[in-house]
Image (cartoon, grey):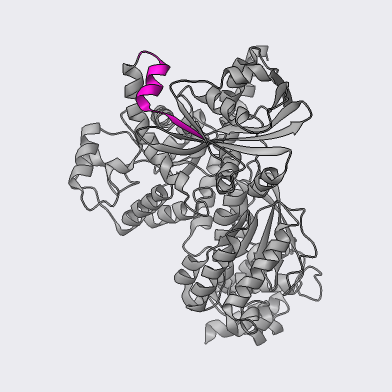
Amino acid sequence: MVGTDRDAARAKQPVNHALAALSARLEWQAPLFAAEPERAALLKLRAPWPLTPRRIRFHRNHAIENALSVLRPFLEYAGIEPELLVGSYDDTLSFAVAGDADVEVIWLDYARFAERLAPAAAAAWLGQRLEALRARTAAPLLLLDWDGDDPVRTEVNARLREVIEPLAGVRLADRGELFEQLGPDYFDLERVSATGTRMSRRGAIHTARLLGTRWLAALLQPRLKAVVIDLDNTLYAGVLGEDGAAGVVLTDGHRRLQRELLDLRDSGLFLGLLSRNDAADVRELFARRGDFPVRLDDFSARSISWELKSQGLERIAQALRIDPAAMLFVDDNVGELLETVQTFPALQCLHADEDAHATAEGLRHYPGLRSFATTGEDSLRIADLHANEQRQRIAATTSDFAAYHEQLRVVLTIGHDRPEALTRAADLSLKTNQFNLALRRYGEPAMRAFAADGQACVSTARLQDRLTDSGIIAVGVFERRERMLSVRELCISCRALGRQLEDLVVAQMLITGTHLADVDEVVFAFRDGPRNEPAREWLERLTGRRLPRRGDELEVAVPVERVRERSVNPHVKVEVLP
Amino acid sequence: MTEVTQLRTILETALAVPLSRVENPSRDQLENWDSLTHIEIVFMVEEAFDVRFSEEEIAKLRSLEDFIGILQVKHAT
């Protein structure tokens, strides 16, 4: 084989792997997303795609093994190769072994506490135990919520939320939808002696599914940012071009699917519409079909044309400013899913079933679509994208960026070690892929530790203009080392990129902190990742030289004066929080 | 697939060992058929044959033949 043929063959490898993985993942959909998943079908699944190893430790006081045995396929679908570390039964939560896992899960049979403790006392005691565990590990802690009868469950869970609120990186897994779905069948009190738990066979399997695809996936993997969906035989039954706007059918399953989409949108995910159809027909469809829960305006980006789906998807990715790897594409046509994955091997796909209930179930359980709480930043993201269209119009009519910033009345607000900003700071570190220099992925406990450290500082930048409040869009973690300032982590949200503000944001975070006095140089940690080319390009512009492409971390020194030069922009108002 | 073949497949999946040469796989013969795996097997048999075993029945089930026998009784009633 000549060199070029060999290169071409090597280049095809990731695509071939992606296509093979997609075929396998489509086969997994039925057993994973079944209304009633079957244990035998789940246990046979073995992922042929690459997985990231993760250690997950369980603290428990009842038999959870029959849930954990079916957890693996759900985690593998999320790209995680789990090593499950299960401690012995411990009602006292002594946490005899802890601290060497990527996540610590506390999964209790609360009936054992309910006999002895009033709800408030039980919640307070659990809070103390979580605090003790928090002090021993920086890993996220996941507490499965109270499993008793209502109204006690509601009361205890409300109190649990209160006690964990001040604790960094502690999340409460809300099983409310499972208790609602299974009712009394969540429990099996007749066989406790045999099974070692009050949890039923169905309770175990449904909990394992939410544990794997939702709660653990949310703690261990970056969240997806958009769901892009096809129209014909996906959002409704029928073909618009043949059946017409009045002829396509909204089945109960499609209604449920559309409501799932709206839930995801409300939680901060973008919706995209990708259809090979006539644009006028699609406009007429949404205008005429008042029975559709979803409206055309709910889609933040749309591509309706006769071009290839991969081309349309690229257009949507550009409009949303996100990488296709952060998208889930839903389509009933396997050929079109394959075609898009051929172009974007890291794209996530969900095959739309003829029974839309199955597709809705897939959306309900697809890993990476849901986070624990919808933050203010999540909802800001969608408003910000819509404002971007106006920003682009302003940019097109202004002569330069100075005029652009002035017209937009940009305000940058810098904060240092602000406790209320640390959750968002961790969120940026964990999720930012494009403008992320070191990819160190600090969680909330680590951010809190840096903020409390006298030699370190967590700086954040909030961006507002007359169109929207973009919220906190940047974080820097800085550490003083004699006459040098080390930039351990530096991230800017992709929604703030393209406004020519990167230099100002970084420089202001650096110079307004207390750590730059008597510093000669700023040393940026940088590591190449799959998608952080924008961060590399920025650092190369700052240093004025090309950086070597290596797998390991680089330390790039810049004279402090070069940073100071970039801290001034008379057209942007800068405020520093006390 | 016959009931026996289906039961054998369940045992092989849960125990993660081939059992084609074992005439009547049982808890006494197979070390990894412990109490936790036993519940796993019980759950899989319940799902596959749409039956439910009581605590007493779960305790008495110790081999492939036990499962075949109890399923015959349950299907007959």
Q: Is residue A216 above or below residue A152?
A: above
Question: Could you say where residue A510 lies in the image, as x and y percent from the top left?
Answer: 62, 29
Q: Quadrant of the C terminus of chain A?
A: top right
Res. A133 image quadrant: bottom right
Q: Is residue A88 above or below residue A457?
A: below
Q: Is residue A522 above or below residue A445?
A: above
Q: Which residues are magenta?
A: A399-413
Residue depicted at x 34% and y 16%:
A398
Q: Quadrant of the N terminus of chain A?
A: top right
Left or right: B31 with respect to A283? right
Q: Is residue B48 visible?
A: no
Question: Could you say where residue A505 lies in the image, as x and y percent from the top left?
Answer: 54, 28
Residue depicted at x 74% and y 38%:
A455
Left or right: A188 with respect to A355? right
Residue depicted at x 21% and y 42%:
A285
Please count the marks in the image: 0
Q: Nearer the viewer, residue A386 or A87?
A: A386
Q: Is residue A95 visible?
A: yes
Q: Nearer the viewer, residue B39 or A463?
A: A463
Q: Is residue A350 above or below residue A212?
A: above
Res. A52 image quadrant: top right
Q: Nearer the viewer, residue A252 or A238?
A: A252
Question: Could you say where residue A158 lies in the image, as x and y percent from the top left?
Answer: 51, 69
Question: Could you say where residue A278 lies in the image, as x and y percent from the top left?
Answer: 25, 32
> Residue A183 lies in magenta, yes or no?
no
